[in-house]
Structures are given as C-alpha cells and as structure tokens.
Image: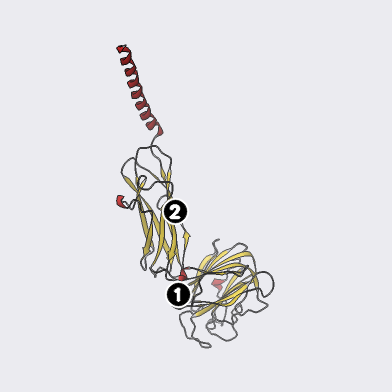
Amino acid sequence: MVKSNLTVPCEIDLKTGAIAGTQNQFITLVQPPSDANGDSWLETLVKIDFKGFTTVKFIVDYGETSSGWTVNIGDSASNDGYGGDGGTQSNDAEMQIANGNMAVFGNDYNTPPGAQIIQGNVPKLVSKGSRIDLEISNQKLAWNNHKGLQNSLNSPYLYATASQADATGSVNSSIYASFNRVISGRSDRLGSGVRKVTILLDPIDYSITPKAVAMAEGNAGTTPVTFTITRKGATSWASSVDYAIGGSATNSSNYNNLGATDRATELAGTIDFAAGEVSKSLTLYVVGDTQFEPNETIAVALSNPVAPFSSYITTAIATTTIDNDDSLVANVNVYYAIAAVGLAVVILSIAKLRSMT
C-alpha cells in the first residue's frame, strides 16, 4: 500500500497560530488563525469538500472554560449561529457550542425552517480541559466528550454532503467549520477556549489488546498468547499498521514468534486489513520450562498507521506478563543434591589419598 500524505492529520493551534499537516484539496483554510477581538485566543474557519470520502472528524481540545461561540459547523458560508443563514442556502443546517452548551439547528426544510433539533441540545458538553470528538457525514452528527456525553443524531434536516440539490443555492457537497467564532465571522459572536483543532478525513482508528494480561509459563511445550488488533471508523477502505514486539521476555528462548521456530527472530512486521475487516490477531507461543526465573513481559506496540485518508492509534501498546510457575524450593533441592554428591566425591577422594600414605 502506498502511504497517502493525508494520513497526517491537519492540526490548527489557536494559541500560537501554527498549522501542522499536509495541505490537500479537501480542506481549505478560508480564514487563517487570527485574533479579531484581541483576547489571545485565535479564531479560524475551514471548508471541507466531501470528494471521495464520507466522514470528517474534528477533535477539539479546550485549554480554558468555553466562553461565547467556540464551535460552529454548517452547510453555508453565511451561517452565524442559531440556524441563521441569510438566505444563501436551503441546506443550511448548523450546530454550535456556545458557553459550553451544544445546540443543533435543522435546515430550511425543517418545520419551522431552521428550527432546533431537540435531540442535539446538550448542556455542559465542554469545560476547561475538555476534548470533544465531532463527526460529520451526510445527514449525521456524532459527538463524544469522553466524560459520558456521547451520542449521534441522524436527520434529513442535517448536513447535505452528498451533492443534494438546493432550492436557494448551488448543489451542496461541503461544510464550513469555525472555531472561537461563528462561520460568518460576526464580530459580536466570537468566543474563546478552543486550544487546538485536529481534522481527520474518513479516519481509521487502531487499538491493540492482549487476550490475557497475565499467563502461566508452563513447564514444557508451548502456550499461545494472542494480541488482537482492531480498527474502527472508515473500515470500508483497506489499510495497514506496523507492529513491533518487545518486553523483558527473550525471543526464541522465552517465546516463538507466530509459532514457527524459523521465524522466531522476526520482531516486527505489518498487519494488512482488507476492505471490511475490523480485527486481526497476532499469536506468539510461550516456551515452557522448569527454570525458576523472574516474571517476564511480552509487549506489542503499534505504529505507522496507513490509510487512503486519515488514520491514528488510540491504544498503541498491549502487554502480557508471563508468570513464573516454577518453585524456588524445588530448584534449591536440586542444587543441594548436586552439592551433596560433590561433597561425597571430595570426601571419598580424601579418604583414598589417606589410605595411600
């Protein structure tokens, strides 16, 4: 798979104005970060064109308590909060976060036009230090503040991103998203609190978990230990992620990679997901013995996610502890037995020498 430059997310820092990530034809920076009201919190506006992908995810990090309009996402460049549009689009749904509270307003086809969609009314969605995920796709909005407020809203009165006809304006396949301001840039609807915005297109999220956090070593043979790599998000695309095996356990002697002794030195590789696949397993084989030794660990780490658009890793490392199940007493008894035999040999040798003198 050829790595796409879009796997690097677009990040906008609204304290420093720094922008990271590759520029592309899908994300347009309409208004670079600037400070219109001189409060040291920058404002920005971006346009997302849905061309060949279906979902955009905004990860919004708050560095301070939300004040005023901190997020406004809508179909129209003239959206200015509360479902207002100025008559340039009929598909003019929008959501806003103002003073920490989220509200969602339907487009002009709603009854009445632009009316609030009550299911999207979420008080106290954000606070100082919050991280909120917002996912937009055709006629859908999903949110998660990672503190128990997580849901999604599907409605024909929400975002039109699939080239729907528009009774007032042009065919619609894009949205606008503004931060620390409303989309239109009204001077009386600015805000503060958003520290950073990360933009991901058709994101694929990887995680890894061990089947067991601990297991017995065993006295002989091999015991499988499995790690599961899962992905979610835009799983209709093929993608891949690299892995590396580490930990305090020693490859070849404490475990065999993939159960094949001729591959026991392979400590890294790539896991390929076909379109539609959501889970893959990586199985190692712990080698049993009767040697007393400290507990050991096997750790598998993910890195370098690759996807046609955006990808990232939520849980990068999984660890299984190999518990020593051999008795120190048994080993000591063996040592004592060996020592006793050695002492007997010494005594016999001395006795033999004396008999010869």
* Secondary element at tag 2: strand
Q: How many marks?
A: 2
Circle number at residue 318: 2
How many C-alpha atoms fall within 10 Å of the one at disc 1: few (<14), some, or many (≥20)? some
| Secondary structure category for the residue under label 1 | loop
Q: Nearer the viewer, residue 157 or 160?
A: 160
Q: Furthest-right residue in view?
A: 38
Mark with earlier residue (1, 2): 1
Identity of the amino acid at label 2? Ala
**Image position, residue 83 (x, y; %):** 59, 79
Mark 1 residue type? Thr
The residue at the far bottom in this view is 168
Residue 306: numbered disc: none
Q: Is residue 105 visible?
A: no
The N terminus - image quarter: bottom left
The residue under label 1 is 54
Q: Judge the density around disc 2: few (<14), some (14-19), many (≥20) Cα neighbours within 10 Å.
A: many
- In this rendering, is residue 209 above or below 338? below
Is there CB contact under 8 Å for labels 1 and 2? no
Q: How is the image coloured?
A: secondary structure
Q: Is residue 323 visible?
A: yes
> In percent of the image, x 37 and y 25: which residue is there?
339
Q: Name the residue at 65% across, 69% down.
A: 41
